[in-house]
Amino acid sequence: MQKALKIVMVPKFTGTAYFAATEKGAKEAVAELKGKGVAIDFLFKGPSVANTDEQIRMIDDLVTQKPDAIIIAASDADAMVPVAKKAKTSGIKVITFDGDVADPTARQWFVNQGTFTQAGAALVDVVAEQAGASERFAVVSTAPGAFSQNSWIAAMKAHMQAKYPKMQLVDIRYGLNKPAESFSAAQDLINKYRGQLDAIVAPSVVALPKVAEAVEEAGLSGKIVVTGMSTPKDMKEFVKRGTVKTVVLWNPVDLGYLAVYAAQASLAGTLKDDATQAKLPAGRLGTRDAVASLEDITAKGPLTLKNVLVLGNPFRFTKDNIDQFNF
């Protein structure tokens, strides 16, 4: 058996079930690779709460220990560029996941949990399946300037135009990432469009449970389709009651798992830094495409992602599978 590869995974922060799920997936991949004769010395280390300066200090410190690869969920895309570059130029393979760095040359590959295009399309498809292809729906978002949410909304609009030209997005309200504000935003929509609203979509972890609560309180469970992006833990009770039939997100266990396979392939030379199109064997996930560039839709117009591996289509959490997840 060859010398063990040293791979370190640095999440945005550790004190959350979401990143604990990515660690679980990473460790699963490490165990599988070990079974195939690839020994990996794996370390999962990050700040306990979101703190960009602390994350940079930790990575700086890890670089001096010369691991073979470092897998980073960047808490700040711009601020993390210098330390990622430093690691890369010192010969460490740098893989980003969950949150990329602003400069793609500062890392080898980005393991993307799902493009804006994919997530926006999935949300609109759920509305079409559950409410109908010519229905009226509204959105409860976070803040008017939130890049991710605005990008998902832009992707939703593009998918509607292409696939469901009769569907209408009638209103967007903002819950400012706060539970009470999200609840009243949903209430306002329900009151304003009484009987004229078929669905509410909330692409926000904070807003979706509050929208579901507002719909239940109005006695409209089953009358207004509620979907969006949130965590299984926050949505379990609403899914069990049938107020929400589908929650769209990605599976963080699979994300951590794929990131380790990408790091190992990068070290083995099977995934070359300059590959324009490669098939990455990723254990139980089958193969994943590694591409030099990929077009996505964002709030600021089209975006070309560089050196990216996409986890796949968004994951749908339903009453049949939601109990399997604890994040």
Image: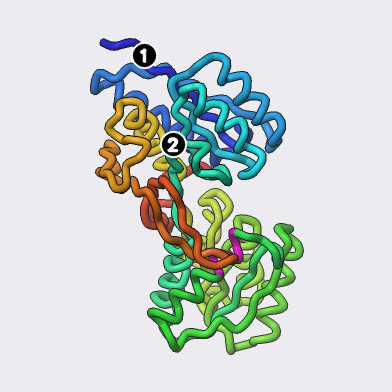
Q: Where's residue 168, x and y in %?
A: 52, 85
> Does residue 242 appear to the left or right of 49 in the view shown?
left
Nearest to the observer: residue 117 or residue 26: 117
The secondary structure making up most of the magenta span is helix
Q: Secondary structure at mark 2?
A: loop
Is the residue 316 above or below the residue 309 in the image?
A: below
Give the quarter of the image for residue 75. top right
Give the quarter of the image for residue 267. top left
Is the residue 130 above or below the residue 238 in the image?
A: below
Is the residue 22 above or below the residue 168 in the image?
A: above
Magenta span of residues = 148-153
What residue is disc 2 on? 108
The span from disc 1 to disc 2 (Cα, nearest Å) is: 21 Å
For the N terminus, which image quadrant?
top left
Q: Residues within 10 Å of mark 1 (few under 14, many from 20)?
A: some
User: Which residue type does callout 2 highlight?
Assistant: Gln
